[in-house]
C-alpha cells in the first residue's frame, strides 16, 4: 500500500474515532487530507469503501501484532506474548474500537458486515491452531470448545478495557488469562464429549473456503489482465513478461505449499522494472491482489482450513 493511501486511512481512523463514523462527512475527510472532493472519489468510490479500507488496515495491523511478537521460548510462552500484544493493540486503538461498537459498523452495508464476520471466523481459527500447538493431544478433542471459551473471555475483558480510563497491564492480563485457559484444558473428564465439532462448524468452514476460492479467482483474473496487456509489447519483451508472470502465478496458485516470499518479491520486482506504460495499470492491480492474497493467508493454518 502506498504511503499516501496509508496516510489517508490513518487520518480517517482518527476522525472516525473522534467524531464517529456517521458524523464524519466527506467534507471533514477531504479537509483533513488537504484534497478536493473530486480527488476523494479518485481514491475511494464512497465513504463505505473507505470504511472497508480502514477495517482492512486495522486488521492487518492486528495480524502483524500477533505474528511478530511470538519471540523465542515454549509455545505457551509465545502464545502468552501474542495475547499481550493483542491487548496492547486494543489499548492503542481503544477509541476507534469503542466507536465501532457504539455505532454498529457491521450494519453500514452488507460488504462491511461480511468482512467483519469473516475476520471473526479467521480469528477463531487462529485460536484453534495456537491452542493445538500449545496443548497438543490434551486439547485436540475439545479444541473448538476451548477456542470458543478463549475467544469469549478475551472479548469480554477487551470490552471492559474499552471503557476503563486508567491504563492496564497487557502482560499481566495475558498471563492471568493463560492460567484460566490452563484450567479449562485440565477440566475435561476422560471421555467427555465436546459440544463443538468440525461438523457443527462446517457452514463456517465452507464460507471460508468459498472466500478463499474467490480470492484465487480474483488473483487469476489479475494475471490474465497482465497477459492481455503484454500483447502491446514487442515480441521479446512480451515473452519475458509472460514467462515471469507464469512463474509468479505458479508460485502463488500452483501448489498447496506456501509461496516462497523471496520468489514472489523477485518476480514482482522484475515485472515492475519493465517500465512499460501499457503494463502499468495491470501490474498495479496484480500487486494489490497479491498483497491481499498474502495478507489474508497469514490468518490461515493448513491444519484447520484444509482437512
Image (spheres, rainbow, N blue to C red):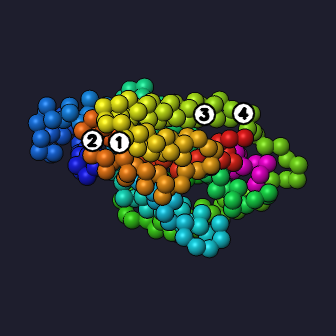
The residue identified by callout 1 is 237
The residue identified by callout 2 is 276
Q: Main secondary structure of the magenta part?
A: helix
The residue identified by callout 4 is 200
Q: Position of residue 94 (x, y in %)?
A: 37, 53
In the image, the segment drawn in magenta is 139-147
Who's the residue at 37% across and 47% down the image? 271
Mark 1 and mark 2 in contact? Answer it, CB < 8 Å. Answer: yes
Cα distance in 3D space between marks 1 and 3: 37 Å
**Mark 4 or mark 2, which has the lower sequence index?**
4
64 magenta-colored = no
4 vs 2, front mark? 2
Who's the residue at 72% across and 33% down the image? 200
Q: Quadrant of the C terminus?
A: top right
3 vs 4, front mark? 3
* Number of residues whose C-alpha sits closer than 10 Å to that of mark 1, classed few (under 14), some (14–19) or many (20 or more): some
Who's the residue at 15% across and 39% down the image? 30
The residue identified by callout 3 is 209
1 vs 3, front mark? 1
Query: Considering depth in this image, is 266 or 88 the residue closer to the camera?
Result: 266
**Mark 1 or mark 3, which has the lower sequence index?**
3
Task: Reply above or below: 103 against 178.
Answer: above
Query: Considering depth in this image, is 300 or 194 the residue closer to the camera?
Result: 300
In the image, taking residue 86 as reference, residue 254 lies left or right, namely: right
Mark 4 and mark 2 in contact? Answer it, CB < 8 Å. Answer: no
Q: Quadrant of residue 204?
A: top right
Who's the residue at 64% across and 35% down the image? 205
Amino acid at each position: 500500500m502506498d504511503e499516501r493511501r496509508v496516510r489517508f486511512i490513518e487520518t480517517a481512523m482518527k476522525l472516525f474515532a473522534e467524531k464517529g463514523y456517521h458524523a464524519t462527512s466527506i467534507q471533514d475527510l477531504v479537509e483533513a487530507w488537504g484534497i478536493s472532493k473530486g480527488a476523494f472519489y479518485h481514491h475511494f468510490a464512497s465513504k463505505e469503501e473507505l470504511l472497508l479500507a480502514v477495517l482492512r488496515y486495522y486488521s492487518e495491523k492486528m495480524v502483524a501484532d500477533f505474528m511478530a511478537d511470538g519471540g523465542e521460548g515454549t509455545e505457551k510462552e509465545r502464545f502468552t506474548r501474542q495475547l499481550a500484544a493483542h491487548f496492547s493493540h486494543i489499548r492503542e486503538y481503544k477509541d476507534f474500537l469503542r466507536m465501532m461498537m457504539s455505532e454498529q459498523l457491521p450494519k453500514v452495508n452488507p460488504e462491511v458486515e461480511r468482512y467483519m464476520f469473516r475476520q471473526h471466523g479467521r480469528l477463531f481459527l487462529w485460536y484453534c491452531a495456537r491452542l493445538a500447538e500449545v496443548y497438543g493431544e490434551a486439547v485436540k478433542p475439545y479444541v473448538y470448545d476451548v477456542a470458543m471459551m478463549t475467544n469469549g473471555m478475551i472479548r469480554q475483558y477487551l470490552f471492559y478495557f474499552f471503557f476503563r480510563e486508567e491504563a492496564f497491564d497487557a502482560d499481566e492480563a495475558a498471563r492471568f488469562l493463560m492460567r484460566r485457559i490452563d484450567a479449562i484444558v485440565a477440566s475435561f473428564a476422560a471421555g467427555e464429549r465436546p459440544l463443538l465439532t468440525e461438523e457443527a462448524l462446517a457452514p463456517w468452514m465452507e464460507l471460508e473456503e468459498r472466500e478463499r476460492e474467490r480470492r484465487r479467482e480474483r488473483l487469476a483474473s489479475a494475471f490474465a489482465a497482465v497477459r492481455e496487456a503484454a500483447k502491446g509489447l514487442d515480441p521479446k519483451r512480451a515473452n519475458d513478461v509472460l514467462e515471469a508472470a507464469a512463474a509468479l502465478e505458479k508460485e502463488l496458485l500452483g501448489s498447496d505449499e506456501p509461496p516462497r516470499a523471496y520468489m514472489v518479491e523477485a518476480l514482482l520486482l522484475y515485472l515492475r522494472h519493465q517500465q512499460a506504460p501499457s503494463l502499468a495499470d495491470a501490474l498495479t492491480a496484480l500487486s494489490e491482489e497479491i498483497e491481499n492474497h498474502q495478507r489474508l493467508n497469514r490468518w490461515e493454518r493448513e491444519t484447520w482450513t484444509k482437512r
